[in-house]
Amino acid sequence: MDWQAFGVSLRLAAWTVALLLPMALLLARLLAWRRFPGRLVVEAVIALPLVLPPSVLGFYLLVLFNPGAPLGRWFMETTGTTLVFSFPGLVLASLIYSLPFAVQPLLRAFQAIPRQLREAAWCSGLGPWRTFWKIELPLARGGLLSALVLSFTHTLGEFGVVLMVGGNIPGRTRTLAVAIYDRVQAFDEAAAGRMSLSLLIFSLIAVMAVFAVERRR
């Protein structure tokens, strides 16, 4: 087991989930309760990573993060480091790539809340913010847990986007999925098998937990 790569993967997944869930909550709630021009485009953009090949998405992110592009140049001027081949670049890429895995479960959870409950809360004197905390979020906690687990496990197993954007720098951007690829390239099937089995077991347990939550809902 490449524990250094495993640590990078865990750190990447933890940062991605911590930054992604608040963003996904806002987007899912907006899509569940509001009708606005361009809604179809927003939904399509959020779902795009589900169907777009990781190499294609990774290529465009690599172009976007390059110091010659506006975003990459701004980040370099602000922080003194580049987005490409860096851990912050991996986090930003993972936010984009894992977005639908966080938004979709939350969107279904918010859509399942009857509108009458929100209206009753408003009639009882609760404002929009307190209604969200007291009514909506507790009812959507199953979707929140599913979003957390799916986002974490999906980020943990990322390969194509991670390799395109972050490269293969030990201790910085080499994740467990990239380490498995390295072991296969080196014909070290035993090490690749151990690491693959670890990811398989972890992912299986996570998916079973999501199904259990959905069944209880």
Image: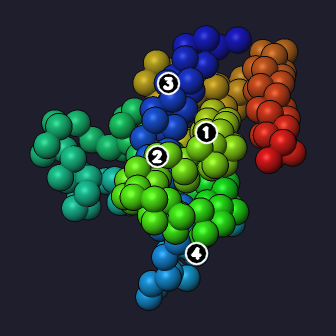
How far apart are the two marked residues, 1 and 2, measured between alpha carbons? 18 Å
> Of discs 1 and 3, which sits in the foreground?
1
**81 up-or-down from 112: above or below:** above
Name the residue located 71 percent from the left edge and 27 percent from the top edge: 180
Badge 1 or badge 2: first in the primary sequence:
2
Disc 2: which residue: 133
Is residue 48 something that shows in the picture?
no
Amino acid carrying label 3: it is Arg
Secondary structure of the residue carrying numbered label 3: helix
Disc 4: which residue: 44
How far apart are the two marked residues, 4 and 3, measured between alpha carbons? 29 Å
Amino acid carrying label 2: it is Trp
In the image, taking residue 213 as reference, residue 34 lies left or right, namely left
Name which quarter of the figure residue 196 lies in.
top right
Badge 4 or badge 1: first in the primary sequence:
4
Secondary structure of the residue carrying numbered label 4: helix
Name the residue located 43 percent from the left edge and 24 percent from the top edge: 172
Badge 1 or badge 3: first in the primary sequence:
3
Name the residue located 65 percent from the left edge and 39 percent from the top edge: 145
> Of discs 2 and 4, which sits in the foreground?
2
**140 up-or-down from 81: above or below:** below
